Image: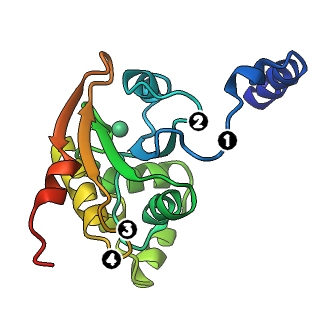
Amino acid sequence: MTSLQSILEYNREFVEEKKYEEFLTTKFPDKKMVVLTCMDTRLIDLLPRAMNLRNGDAKIIRNAGAIVTQPFGNIMRSILVALYELNAKEVYVVGHHECGMTGLNASNILEKAKASGVAENTVDTLRHSGIDLERWLTGFDNVTQGVMKSVEIIKNHPLLPAGTPVHGLIIHPETGKLDLLVDGYENLKTPTGV
Ligand code: ZN
């Protein structure tokens, strides 16, 4: 049985037996928060449980590394949609120790792409069309730096609603322990000159 088949088979049973009932909620986050975190498999259940989040409590956005690289990319758009359209009021960026985006190396990925059958000249063509693959296929030197950078981009975004706390944390992928890097409430107290 393929992975797809087994998912579909399980799903029929899940729906028939109404296993969904315990998850019923609305699209609005009860705890009025949006969390940006990493797609790491260890965090699927661990992160919500370690943060006391249940279905319906938060908007959770996941990508490789919990990274916002572009102020006008799709991660920042998702955060703004959560804040403006879905009643979220606070932003949490939660990176984690042992993240695969630490020291991510573009040339390693490009070598693997070639080994998997991507034609040699495809990479050249991309470079010639002005795509900076090294900049795109990059992570961070360490997770602290990664979280701080994402928090900075969100916090300084021109479309961020005034008074939105943007917190930065690091979670341990085994114990779920959270270390606080940026207390978004503290930043709100900083004089803005307004
Ligand atoms: Zn990660």
Cα–Cα span, label 1 and label 2: 6 Å
CB within 8 Å, label 1 to label 2: yes
**Mark 2: amino acid:** Gly
Disc marking residue 161: 3
**Residue 87 screen position, x and y as percent:** 52, 54
**Residue 148 screen position, x and y as percent:** 19, 52
Residue nearer the viewer, 90 or 40: 90
Dot placed on the residue nearer the N-terminal end, 3 or 1: 1
Please name the colour scheme applied to the rendered image.
Answer: rainbow
Q: Which residue in the structure is indicated by mark 4? A: 158
Q: How many marks?
A: 4
**Mark 1: amino acid:** Thr
Cα–Cα span, label 4 and label 2: 28 Å
Q: Which residue in the structure is indicated by mark 2? A: 56
Question: On the rendering, which quadrant does ligand 1 occupy?
Answer: top left
Task: Identify the image quadrant of residue 100.
Answer: top left
Cα–Cα span, label 1 and label 4: 29 Å
Dot placed on the residue nearer the N-terminal end, 3 or 2: 2
The residue lying at 38 percent from left, 27 percent from top is: 51
Disc marking residue 166: none
Q: Which residue in the structure is indicated by mark 1? A: 26
Dot placed on the residue nearer the N-terminal end, 1 or 2: 1
